Image: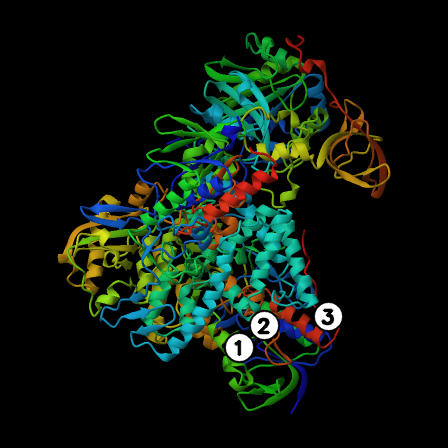
Amino acid sequence: MTDMNNHVVVIGAGHNGLVCAAYLARAGRQVTVLEAAEQPGGAAITREFAPGFKVSAAAHLLYMLDENVRKELSLDTAGLSFSQQDMKTTALAEDGNHLVMSKDAVQGANISSEDQAAMKEYRRLMGRFARLLHRMNNRIPPRVGSGNRDDTIGLAKTALAIRMLGRKDMREFLRMAGINMYDILQEYFDNPLLKGALSMEGVLGAKLGPRSNNSVFCALHRMSGMQGTALPAGGMGTVSDALASAAQKLGVKIRTSAAVTKVLLQGDRVGGVELQDGERITAGTVVSSADPKTTFLNLVGAKNLEAGFVRKIHNYRSFGNAAKLHLALQGPPEFKALNQSQLGDRLLIAPDMDYVERAFNHVKYGEHSAQPVLEITIPSLYDDSLAPAGQHVLSAVVQYAPYQLKSDWHNGKPVFTGQVIDTLAKYAPGIRDQILHCELLTPVDIEKEFRISGGHWHHGELALDQFMMLRPVPRAAQYASPLNGLFMCGAGSHPGGGVMGSAGRNAARAILALESSEGQQP
Amino acid sequence: MQKYDAIVIGAGHNGLTNGAFLAKAGLNVLLLEKNDYIGGASTSRELHKNWIYSNASYVSSLLRPEVYRSMNLAKYGLQVVPYGGNATLSRDGDYIGSYVDPDASRREMARLSPRDADAKLRFDRDIMRQSRFIRKFLLRTAPDPTSFRPRDLVEMFTMGKEMLKMGEDVIYDMMRLYTMSISDYLDEYFEHPLIKASKAGSGIIGSAMGVMSPGTAYVLLHHAMGDVDGNMGAWGFARGGTGAIASAMADCFLDHGGTLRKEAGVEQILVRNGKVTGVALQNGDEYQADIVVSDMTLPRTFLECMDEKDLDPEFIRKVRNFKIRGSSGKVNIALDGLPEFTALEDNPELIKGDLHVVDSVERLERAYDDWKNGTWSKDPYLDILIPTLTDPTMAPPGKHFMSVFVQYVPPKVNGKDWTSDLRDQFAETVFNQIEAYAPGFRDLILHAEVRTPFELENDIGLTEGNIFHGELTIDQLLFNRPIPGYAQYRGPAKGLYMCGSSNHPGGGIMAAPGANAAREILRDIRKPNTVPEGWMDD
Amino acid sequence: MNRISGNKTVGVIDYSSKDHYRTKVFPSPFYSRQEPLNHLKEWGRWADYLSPRAYTSADMEYFACRNACAVFDLTPMTKYRISGADALAYLNRLVTRDVEKIKPGRVGYTVWCADDGRVVDDGTIFHLRENRYRLCSQERHLDWLLTNAMGFDVAVEDETHEVAALALQGPTSCAVLKKMGLGDIESMKPFDIRFFDLENTGLMISRTGFTGDLGYELWIEPQYAELLWDRLFEAGRLYGIQPMGDEALAMLRVEAGFIQANHEFLNANATVRSSHTRSPFELGLGWLVHFDKPNFNGRKALLEEKQRGHRYNLVKLDINGNKPATDSYVFTTGKKFAGTVTSATWSPSAKASIALATLKAPHGRPGEEFLVEIYYQKELKWSRVMARARVVEGVFFDPPRRRQTPPADF
């Protein structure tokens, strides 16, 4: 039976599943990854959405990939390459007076020297806090109040890291970490376009407006990858392909079109999984990269868990608020007063904070924004593989679009798509005539296509009450679940979403540490 | 020029408390009040003939019993009388009531949702767990987490120990409660919209946040952690109006030899060589003292009553960034008779308590959207009380006083100052809202005082009209209140202290900031402590 | 989707009416019969209902129960109807004991826990028929029961007010029922359920009780409550039947060694001080924890506790002297604090001062001796004694008739 005991099944070949599998294989475990889709990648894939047009279907920018993962799994030799790195961000102004933000400068939009100076301090401070978070990202969150030695050390390390900020910055950290972008940006800046653009960093993917507390934390989380924004050559699928091939090199078996429908139990612990076609695969350890609700409520089943835990999972907030727009364009779009070189930047439509806040207001009531905010890329400018020659792909994250639309998405989708295109057309007046094909993925579509319950790209809201030792829920935040032998390695665990791989890496470490402390192969 | 041991600026309840404890320790204390009446927001005045208005703060629960007893407030005439229950009225004529009798309250919830009626046990348990923790630190000075001084380390350790005593799961609950929105928090307990709405109001009273804003769950705790005679979360009236609290405190202060001067607005706190030397009044008088204690809000103290030269620019920047946004208004009304709320037609019990008009969390959140847009809520959240149903001293027999707290009301309307025209329009909104639930109400109005944040600031010095002297969010709580590094009641100049609600543990008629500041002052000048310790209930 | 609901019940209490507030405590369906018999006019409150403390004399009611038979109104007890294809699976995840062993027509005593292994409540499961159960308890748990229903095909409904119930307890109880014409009643074994037709109304009888004596519980729709009471008292006239109130029951249940919520333990879902809750082991209910079934609330925590050991032992104390040890501290013979008394009474049957007490583990071995600190007052003079006490193993009063089938005839 050692064979079965040494066998690990990883559910889902998303980036975290692949990373976790690779690390477990590297440690000598026999690992099979089971993926429901026809290709590995989960929400980090490139797929055709119109004949000849390919796009990163969910995540479209890479800015958080864990450098440990990249190094330790030799992703660069496994095929990871970029068509664009350290991308600039251009915040679009309706009057064409755009604002350009690069790594260390901010220009345009009549920005004052005071704002430029403030930007330096803002970046310094946020950078320090992001680095703090960066360090947390690669740690297994400690429990609080467990009395366990390792947890106490973990907490002490966290406290020490905060103290190392020094008295002045530490005080700012304690003040800022829990509040909102609106207040902080008001403190620092005057320029509305700058504030609008920066506020967006705190609300992307979240059910938050600039005035909502938690948005500073979300912005820091985005920054905590400590990397510039990049476009992988060939789209996000390249990242997954590299991960898959790195994993396979380490001996991981990847099976696609193998949808797990059930986690099987054997007495007190997991015994394997069952596939859609009824096939049963035995394993001593099962690691799920699916979101927590899918994992526990669908695959394990509430019946097999304790009721208090089920309630916590049920209360985990995981309804998505962002949609994804894909346009096949017959030529490069023309944005007002935007030159060809800027067109390839990360483009934002978030003209001021109140605009973003108003867009957010709708989602609170189960409506989609009347005037949405957008994060746009045109990856085909740098990558011929994505569109026929001379034609282009526009990919945009669109907010806000609630999973639970009060009307319903069947009727709501055409309306919302129209509003999104209208918004785009304000900045790129001719774009409507260039559209060959248009695809809008609502959170409901995202749920269906990527099997993420609620269609939330972070597998659940990123907020202080769902972070670190609270993610996804208290007492199950160290990657182990209440069921012996079942682990979590997806974005629903610390440190959450974004194509990072840290959850997968941390999970592998947690699994190996737990098993070695038990002094046995389970 | 007369010299005192200490000068306290502002005869609000915290200033009075602070002055009383200093006087009790033998200090020669001068208490200065800009108005011709005392109490600040803890006041009640005859604004209509034979009617006493509690025209700012109108109920009491947080007042620390330790302070009450130590200041002998009963001897000086104070009585706090609990009032019964509350009701939240919905537009469709239904309501959810809360009765003094717990079984009746349970049955009332079960009327709408049997499940919620039982979930309330879990909700109360969890709120009580958190209240018990925070109550231990109300009469203590918050430690500075960046400090290595033994005193701060010991206090941090105490806090950690108390936290561990709660147990692992309750610590997680705490981390969540302090960061969640009241709306998400309630979703984890209740299913019925009216029940959720009835609880959500506590999460936004006095706060410039919406029920869906993360951070509002704590505000609910702030309203739940008080008690009347050990009944946690219960609220009561000061007999004779809220001013009875201030007047009893003032009598205590005077009895201990303190000097009180009204109509003595402070122009400037005087500082020489980094030390306070006294104060200059608006009328030109000057008084000397080595200790000056401000009961005013943080911005008023430092931005209006001090010379910029005497302060560090970084400190000033932080004061400017202190969040003290007005979000509430108050309409005080003399009534010719008792209004009849349609929903409560057959229910003489509930009308004695708090009445709220709201029927869903969404409606509350939309009221906040108006505030964000720079206007008062067109469908405002109201906290209505008729104290004269409990307290016979406030109006002639058969007549009534009605206190209406209104959320949300911005400090400026669309960026512009309030005008009397706008104020009338605002009053119309409030009157119409009440009329919709109590037809005929308008005909009963004999007189009304309408207070927007503009009046709250100008009359009683609440910056921007914020009733708590600053938002109660985690960036401004405990060692962050009012601003990190100044959370131990000491100002940036030697001899300068702060005792108002801008300081830990914040607003509401609690008297804790005033008492805590007195303890710190007496400690600095090595005088015996006259401030009682917290009872630390187990 | 599973069918889960919290219904609005009708019965004596109409939850749909706002007017409920005019009545803070409601008369039970038996009120019209209880009221004239309640000579003392002392009513206590039990949940929504008026509950007589004693009708004439608690002591005499006690002896009626031990000597003849006594009737106690248990309508206020919380009752849940649990039905559906997954009812058994649902209950098996909810409670610690193996519910599969409770066959249709049988009753089982059980305890249920939160995830942390701390007791939420104890109560009885009535297996009425296939896929249909009744769960009876002292506290209310609809929130917890519905939380437990997630993922199960089960309906959970509060039927407290839809069922009126009387306990008929004591040595002549079987004879009274026989006299009422309920055929073959004597063949009912302890924990059996039978259904009878009482003048065209459905009457359910279970051989259960809270007195440790021979006894039955009778369940009927509220509109027939008075009929049931009348028939019972007519039949019992020659068998010494008496109504009995809360005070007598409190004596009986301590003699029988039964625990009660809010005395021996607290509802873990409502307890503020989380360390004040108790596990089944700490209540001496380890025998109700069946680890051989796969998943139930608290299983993991209880397994750990079983290995690690528990913090308290609930014991029965036989105390020297005749002063009831209410609210007493318990010390070791070396005068070290050992625990507290949770329930105490004078036992008229055992002629002893008896108590249930929670002691810090490992204290509480059978035969272990302690000192119980008792304060008592005689004609305004307060005295304190340190009474010797001994842990006893069995219950204080355990007549064979309790289990005897068929019961003795009278």
Q: Chain of mark 3?
A: B
Label disc, if present, on residue B486 of the rendered structure: 2
Q: Which amino acid is tagged 1? A: Phe
Q: What is the x, y in percent for residue C27?
A: 54, 33
Label disc, if present, on residue B2 of the rendered structure: none
Image quadrant assignment for residue B424: bottom left
Q: Which amino acid is tagged 3? A: Asn
Contact, mark 2 vs mark 1 (Cβ under 8 Å): yes
The relative height of residue B229 versus residue C267 in the rendered view (above or below) is below
Q: What is the x, y in percent for residue A272?
A: 46, 30
Which of the two residues, A234 or C318, is positioned nearer the viewer here? A234
Q: Which residue carries the number 3 mark?
A: B529
Q: CA distance from mark 3 to mark 1?
A: 30 Å
Q: Residues within 10 Å of mark 2 (few under 14, many from 20)?
A: some
Q: Which residue carries the number 1 mark?
A: B315
Q: Given this view, does label 2 or label 3 mark the residue nearer the observer?
A: 2
Q: Earlier in the sequence, mark 3 or mark 1?
A: 1
Which of the two residues, A100 or A387, is positioned nearer the viewer here? A387
Image quadrant assignment for residue B162: bottom right
The relative height of residue C409 versus residue B324 in the rendered view (above or below) is above
The reply to whether residue B257 is visible in this rendering is yes
